[in-house]
Amino acid sequence: MVHGVPEPGLPPDLPPADGIGKADQVILPDTTSATKSSATRENVAKARNLPKGSDKFAAAVEASGLTDISKDLAEHKEKF
Amino acid sequence: MGDNEMPEQALVADILGQELSKEASQLARKAAEDSESIEHKLLSLEAHAKRIEHELSQYMLIAKKRISDGFWSCIDATKELARLDSTINLESLESDVRIAFSRFDSVARVKDMSGKTVEGMTWKELLGLSDATLQLFYQAAKSLFDCGQHPKAEAAFFFLTTVDYKQYAFWLGLGHAAFHVGNLNQAINAYEMADSCQPGSIYPSLYVANCFEALNDYQEALLALEKADTDYKSQDTKDPELEHAIRERIMRAKLKA
């Protein structure tokens, strides 16, 4: 890898944790063409390989998955 | 439990699970009607809808398991980190997480929150998870990745992208972990999401190119590299080594495309 340039095969580097939770304030460094995030729920459904118009379904699956965690937490208080 | 009391978390989870199956069926029917694929022409509408419903049901099971596995992977990895780092406050983390997840206390509330996520809000915002908790979970997921525990890292980043889909680093992590477990389509999709979180960023396109090269699809790899080149040119700051590396990769991809 040269100065963080990914070669075929993949670099393992991930950004540090600083800035997590501040997505809306992210400004690309030294970039005049930086634009605001265009991440949308529709894109998320697409990223999950779901058919067009699945936004509601994708959100419902997420809700169901997170509710399962809530159930686990309620049932297993010793897990932490 | 009285009439006005909220049902238990387990009951909420069961009811949501059942409703989700119905939603999958309705969505499959609509997707089959709207489909213009070859499958649609070869199969009856009913058969096509059934096939889509089966795929959605599979997705539902896999996604729910990944979200849950990913959460517990984050918890376990955070505990490991806390053994080495005394500044990590597990009690505070537990309190934040338990308060956040206790909000899934009725079907009506979960449905309301689900509707708000469709409008663009994140689960992080709706549950009130703190930045500190997400930073800690990210560190945990990253540590799994750095240790080579890629399947666990993939689940952890899947969970994180579920909780907050607006984070560039979460999608990048999901892409990297998916790449290493050979889930290249998932990796490509994740990098595309990373790109949408930080439009103009060069690296997601380079990583997409890596995936297509691994798939021996040099035509698509070339397109991704050319996008990286375009994004590089639009930046004010120049890095000759990066520029040279991108150009070289484009030349190599052209030879193989």
Image (spheres, coloured by chain):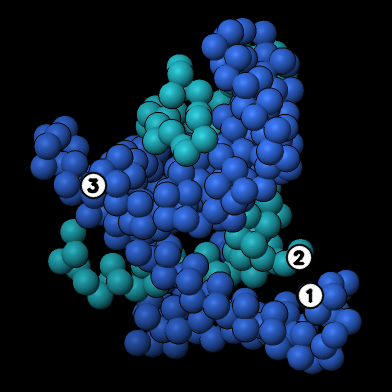
Residue count near mark 1 (Cα–Cα under 10 Å), binned few <14, some 14–19, many ≥20: many
Residue at x 58%, y 80% (from the top left corner): B57
> Does mark 1 fall on the same chain as mark 2?
no
Chain identifier of the residue bearing label 2 in the image: A
Which residue is denoted by mark 1 in the rendering? B31
> Does mark 3 fall on the same chain as mark 2?
no
Q: What residue type is labelled 3?
A: Thr
Lateral position of residue B201 relative to residue B148, left or right: right
Q: Tell whether label 1 touches label 2 (CB within 8 Å).
A: yes
Chain identifier of the residue bearing label 1 in the image: B
Q: Nearer the viewer, mark 1 or mark 3?
A: 1
Residue count near mark 2 (Cα–Cα under 10 Å), binned few <14, some 14–19, many ≥20: some
The spot of residue B65 in percent (x, y) is: 41, 70
Q: What residue type is labelled 1?
A: Ala
Q: Quick one: SS at disc 3?
A: helix
Chain letter for blue, please. Answer: B
* Quadrant that contains the N terminus of chain A: top left
Q: In this view, does B13 lie above or below B215?
A: below
The spot of residue B119 in percent (x, y) is: 68, 54
Which residue is denoted by mark 3 in the rendering? B78
Chain letter for cyan, please. Answer: A
The spot of residue B16 in percent (x, y) is: 52, 79
Q: How far apart are marks 2 and 1 (CA)?
A: 8 Å
Residue at x 55%, y 47% (from the top left corner): B214
Q: Tell whether label 3 touches label 2 (CB within 8 Å).
A: no
Q: Distance between the residues labelled 2 and 3?
A: 36 Å
